[in-house]
Image (cartoon, rainbow, N blue to C red):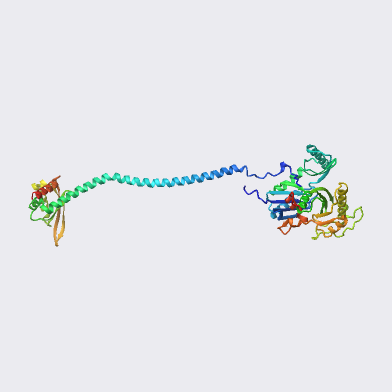
Amino acid sequence: MRINLIPEGLRPTRPSPVPYMPLAGLAAISVIWLITQFAAASQARTKLKEYGSECARVSKRLAEHKELPGRLAHAESERDALQLKGAAVTALTHSGFVCSKVLQALAETASPELRLMAVSLDFDQGKATLTGYGSEETADIEVATFLRSLNANRAVRDTFVGARLDHCNSARRNDVAVKQFSITMEFREGKLQQMIRETDEQEEQG
Amino acid sequence: MFGRKKNDPQVIGIHVGRNTLTTARVATEDGVAHVQELFSEPLPRIPAGWPVELVAEKLRLAKRSVNLKAEVARITVASDLAPTYFFVVPPMKGEQLENALKLQLENKWGNAGSDLSYHFQVIEKRGERCRVFAPSIPTERLRLILSSFLDINCHIDSMEVEGVSLANLMLYCGFAGAAPVAALLVCPNWGEVFILSRKRIALSRAIPKLETDTAVGEDGPLDVPEAVADADGQGALSPAYLGRIAREANKTLDYFEIELLAPAVTSLYLVGESAETVELPAFLHEELEIQVKVLDTGEKVVDDTGMYEPALHGLAVAAAIGEAKAGED
């Protein structure tokens, strides 16, 4: 037998899952959408990272390309300097440098009180440096005179712009007190190249 | 979905007796009911009364022992809360029958001023008359009972009466078939005879304890045992009351057999607090001249709690089992 004294209106309404199904579906769709978005974002981040590194690599190469003209110009100037040096070395070692006239002029201009030690040539700077020494007591005057004589000498003036005293300092040489000096002379523009060219011509003729 | 529907749902069965509150959690597997959790407490109350605070206290206790959340919760109530009336009416149908029964019930309740919740079932048609079984309860009382359970978050799905629960239990256990059987609910202050015929409740009669039941009745002395108590010393029945129960039961059986022209009842099953009274079966057998047994649900109800007594807790289990399916008898 089945009876129920509880009228329909008083029977408990147990929560039915049906009203929650759309919500559950919506929640499931939201979760799936979020997961998809997260995966897509992750993928996009990875690609962005790749593009970033690619961009950095290209930028580096572009910068290298941009530097090329400057480097080329530098290399060309280095090449010219090297060619000049090579020519000078060749001139000095093979055919007797025409600047012997200059050296002779220097030697003749120097007073007997002064000892000339060396003449060095700086092809890059286009300079010649003359070093020597004199007595502790008279060297100052002698050097000044020598400097004036150099600037007055014709052969020197043809070759150099002028002579300039770098220093004249006290020093000891074989336990003797002396004064060492250094005089720099700047070649006239194109003079050095001319001298080298003349040397080459002499060599060809010889 | 969401774990609400199961193949073998667990059901809460609640029996509100005249003096007891019994709660059982029952799971049915392969046609066998398993009593998984059980709680039984005295619930002293006046007839037709619902002591809200006392019930709330007992239900709180019940909640500690029995998980009251289940797919289904059913309650069976004693006849003082929801009495059953049998009416004889001319052959009627539908709304006409319903209106006639409603009128009859309102007359019985004496226009108590409250709506009635009732159910009716035609149990027999014979010639120009129909016998109708109609349990009813005032809706106000029904609401009060339901609210007590709702307070502990227990949703009651259906409410039936003891007679129907007994019919279902006896059908489930195979005691009730086409032949009529009787069940006697015996408590210290209440008795009720139910006669089940053709798998339905055919007749019931309440035998409340009266003040005069403290002495031997006027109908003449019966050979009543002097000290009648159950094995635990509880549920004691006074000899005078026991004598009256026997006489009234006898009258009911005679009425069923003679007035309703039914076959004689051959067996009587005892249930209730006093059913286990030691000398009761023998006494009733002698008085009624039928086979008398204390209800034993046997293998159809398996006790997992170690507390289950069929005669005492059977009605709560019956409420949980509900309508016995065809073929289970």
Q: Residue furthest top?
A: B96
- In percent of width and height, residue A17 lies at 63, 44
**Relative depth, front residue between B100 and B62:** B100
B219 vs A117, left or right, is: right
**Relative depth, front residue between B39 and A185:** B39
How many numbered circles are shown? 0
B45 vs A178, left or right, is: right
Q: Is residue B169 visible?
A: yes
Please say if A139 is above or below B86. Answer: below
Q: Is residue B79 visible?
A: no
B237 vs A138, left or right, is: right
The image quadrant of residue A6 is top right
Residue under the point 81% across and 55% down:
B270
- In percent of width and height, residue A22 lies at 59, 42
- In percent of width and height, residue A113 lies at 8, 56
Please say if B297 is above or below B147. Answer: below
Q: Residue furthest bottom?
A: A175
**Relative depth, front residue between B98 and A167:** B98
- In percent of width and height, residue B1 lies at 62, 47
**Relative depth, front residue between B118 and B214:** B118
The image quadrant of residue A14 is top right
Residue under the point 26% across and 46% down:
A71
